[in-house]
Image (cartoon, rainbow, N blue to C red):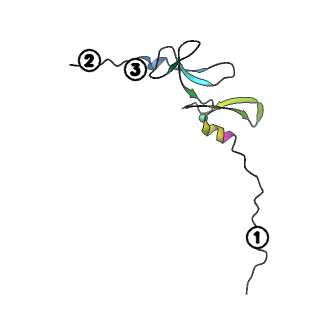
Amino acid sequence: MASICEKDQATQGSVETRRMWANGPFRQWSEARVSRWIPYTTGGYVGAYVCEKCTQTCSGVYKVKMPTNNTVEMWLCGTCRTAVKPTKRHLATHVEHAPLSAVCM
Ligand SMILES: [Zn+2]
């Protein structure tokens, strides 16, 4: 009989969310290796990035300046980034043209 020893669950409890450096992005971090995480230079292993706003893991985060306070920068996922800073559009340049003259015979 084959005896398969899975150790995937062994590290589940030790995962924490860490800021990778001063004012840097948050990332999942664990002292023990978790599945396909990569070793981190200062020790332990790192997984997915974590959004500072919604605290969800994501493949990448963006450094975003808060519109309310330009000195505050947060690391946000794509969704939160769009919510905080909507992509620039031409504002109020589209004016609905009323019919020049209403033809009513
Ligand atoms: Zn987010």
How many angstroms separate mark 3 from mark 2 (CA)? 17 Å
The image quarter in which residue 94 lies: bottom right
Residue under label 3 = 9
Q: Earlier in the sequence, mark 1 or mark 3?
A: 3
Quadrant position of ligand 1: top right
Residue 12, percent from left and from top: 44, 20
How many angstroms separate mark 1 from mark 3 (CA)? 66 Å
User: Does the magenta run of residues contain 35?
Assistant: no
Structural crowding at the residue carrying mark 1, measured as other residues with C-alpha within 10 Å and reported as few (<14), some (14–19) or many (≥20): few
The disc at residue 98 is 1
Give the side of residue 42 with respect to residue 90, left or right: left
> Disc 2 residue type?
Ser
Residue at image position (61%, 24%) is: 26
Which of the two marks, 3 or 2, is nearer to us in this view? 2
> Disc 1 residue type?
Ala
Between residues 42 and 12, which one lies in front from this camera angle? 42
Residue 24, percent from left and from top: 66, 23
> Disc 3 residue type?
Gln
Highlighted magenta segment, given as a residue range? 83-97
Residue at image position (47%, 14%) is: 32
Judging from the image, what secondary structure is the residue with disc 1 in?
loop
Give the side of residue 66 with respect to residue 8, left or right: right
Residue 98, percent from left and from top: 76, 70
